[in-house]
Image: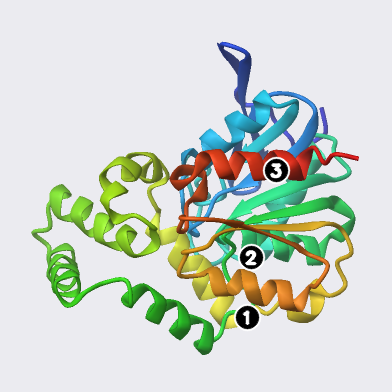
Amino acid sequence: MKTGLLLLLSFLIFSGARAQRMDSIKYAHGYLYFHTYGSGEPIIVLTGGPGANYQQLEEVAVNLGKKQHRAILLEQRGTGRSMPQPFNTSTINLRAAHSDLNLLLDHLKLKQAHFLGHSWGAMLAMSFATAYPARVKSLMLVDPGPFKLDRAVNETYSHNREARLNPQDRQALAEVSRKVRSPNATPADQELYYKWELIPVLYDRTQVDTLITKINKGALGPKMGGLMFQDLSKKGFDLSRKLLLFTKPIHIITGSQDPGAFVSYELKILLPKAHLHWIDKSGHFPMYEQPQQFYATLDKILNPKP
């Protein structure tokens, strides 16, 4: 085992044909946890947020592991068990996130791997690929967040979300937003607020009570997200030119009705050779809204026919 890397915990959980292994890597500010599903071609799986718990994409990793792939699902720094000390801008930033991915690959003795990221996870995957292209075999970007953060992107996304709410919806959201900011906010208030935040990004709002159970597994850690966006805003986040230099395969899987789908379209314009896959009747979470379409698309990407 390499100096400075400590295997803190390793165990196997067998369930049918799959095996899960959870491990951790010691680094200067704590431990970085990750989960492995299946065996075969390695795929690093990155959740969104920033700040979503790894469990939000666990079902995706499990399915990849069942199909002769080795899915490695990271508990990103500042989420789940991967809590750094101190927990501030010195430990939560884009450079640190890159360092963690390099550390993970080194620990697994991988020169390179495929990367699958959802939302913020796709932003991180793109950023890492432009910084360390030799370590990325391909990118699979699921409803990616913007490759360039600016006022126009923020306004377009906000307008798209707002357009999905009628006046009564907006009034209800404003009311619950007021409640969650109160010192007397209850868990019920928090749950209702999260539900209203989720409704505009889903295709079928009548499914929110069913889908929220799965999506909320990856409940956001707001502190991590706040610190990461603080870093991105301070240093700027624009991958437009760097992505042009990345020559490996890029696949974009996007819900046709995601309010952020315009980002995928703009990414395709920037990178004509990228493959854009639309998931019909789906918003921001195609793996849960349209699982059959989503996994069929993923299977075609990972197992192309000659």
**Dot 1 corresponds to which residue?**
235
Q: Nearer the viewer, mark 2 or mark 3?
A: 3
Q: Residue at x 34, y 65 (%)?
A: 200
Q: Quadrant of residue 44?
A: top right
Tag 3: Cα neighbours inside 10 Å, few (<14), some, or many (≥20)?
many
Quarter of the image for the C terminus: give it.
top right
Label 3 vs 1, first from the N-terminus: 3
Residue nearer the viewer, 91 or 293 = 293
Q: In the visual, does 186 lie left or right of 8?
A: left
Three-letter amino acid code of the residue under disc 2: Leu
Tag 1: Cα neighbours inside 10 Å, few (<14), some, or many (≥20)?
few
- Tags 3 and 1 in contact by the CB under 8 Å rule? no
**Dot 2 corresponds to which residue?**
94
Label 2 vs 1, first from the N-terminus: 2
The label on residue 294 is none
**x then y, percent, for residue 142:** 60, 55
